[in-house]
Image: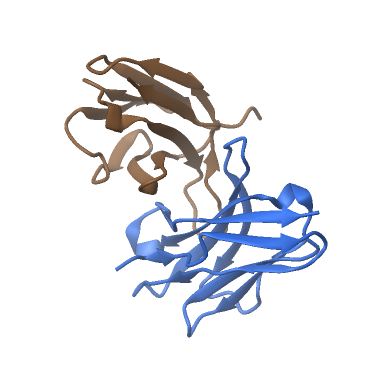
Chain colours: A blue, B brown
Amino acid sequence: AQKITQTQPGMFVQEKEAVTLDCTYDTSDPSYGLFWYKQPSSGEMIFLIYQGSYDQQNATEGRYSLNFQKARKSANLVISASQLGDSAMYFCAMREWNAGNMLTFGGGTRLMVKP
Amino acid sequence: DAGVIQSPRHEVTEMGQEVTLRCKPISGHDYLFWYRQTMMRGLELLIYFNNNVPIDDSGMPEDRFSAKMPNASFSTLKIQPSEPRDSAVYFCASTLEAGGPIEQFFGPGTRLTVL
């Protein structure tokens, strides 16, 4: 089974609107962390936001927030007030504490922001 | 800090040739990771090191691939002999030994093309 599933290969959003990128995960480890990375067309991987499995509140970082629903095993990324520079690939990743310090990545979602 | 440094940024070689990719992690980081990114398979972890010791190399595709970390500031990924299917972007990443929201910092990647 896939550990990280991103079901949206591509999405469009209008500039200044909010968008939600989906991520579901599968683990039996009670201790884990979820990460979101952005990969613009230039290719670099940029860390956006982190959510720990024991965190009581949803993580937020500026215009990024993580909608963490532990029972459903989902960790959706919400980008508010989309900007043209948000057009990129977005990857959800998981670190399982019992699996060492490695990250497992989903297949990514390509977000395109329309002016 | 200069971040994770990878060289070369681009490599074009012919099938059968040896290819060596290089990585300098962020100073003080205990973990180093090698990933491969392709359209077909996404981001895959190849191998990772902790304190210069290989911990998990289960992602290394076959014996043609080898990785070393002779010291805390340098790692290599070698492919010998190279094949066209090895064409991909290879990322190196590093992080601190810690739990919690310690993200992996990625280098800019090496784009490898095997003709």
Asked if residue A84 shows in the view, the reply is: yes
Q: Eyeballing the image, is A30 above or below B92?
A: below
x, y percent for residue B85: 28, 32
Residue that extends furthest to the left in the rendered view of this protein = B63
- The part of the image, by quadrant, that contains residue B61 is top left
Q: Is residue B74 visible?
A: no
Q: Name the side, left or right, on which A7 lies relative to A110.
A: left
Q: Residue at x 71, y 52 (%)?
A: A86
Residue drawn at the location 42% of the way across and 64% of the way down: A4
B47 is higher (above) or lower (below) than B14: below
Q: Is residue A44 left or right of residue B92?
A: right
Quadrant location of the N terminus of chain A? Answer: bottom left
User: The C terminus of chain A is located in which quarter?
Assistant: bottom right
Q: Nearer the viewer, residue A49 or A5?
A: A5
Point 52% across, 65% down: residue: A8
- From the top left corner, tell me how far across and down residue B40 is, in percent: 36, 47
Number of labels in the image equals 0
Rendered image quadrant of residue A55: bottom right
Residue most toward the bottom? A71
Q: Position of residue A110 (x, y in %)?
A: 57, 54
Left-right relation of A20 to B68: right
Seen from the viewer's position, the closer of residues B43 and A59 is B43
Q: Name the residue at 50% across, 38% down.
A: B29
Q: Position of residue A15 (x, y in %)?
A: 80, 59
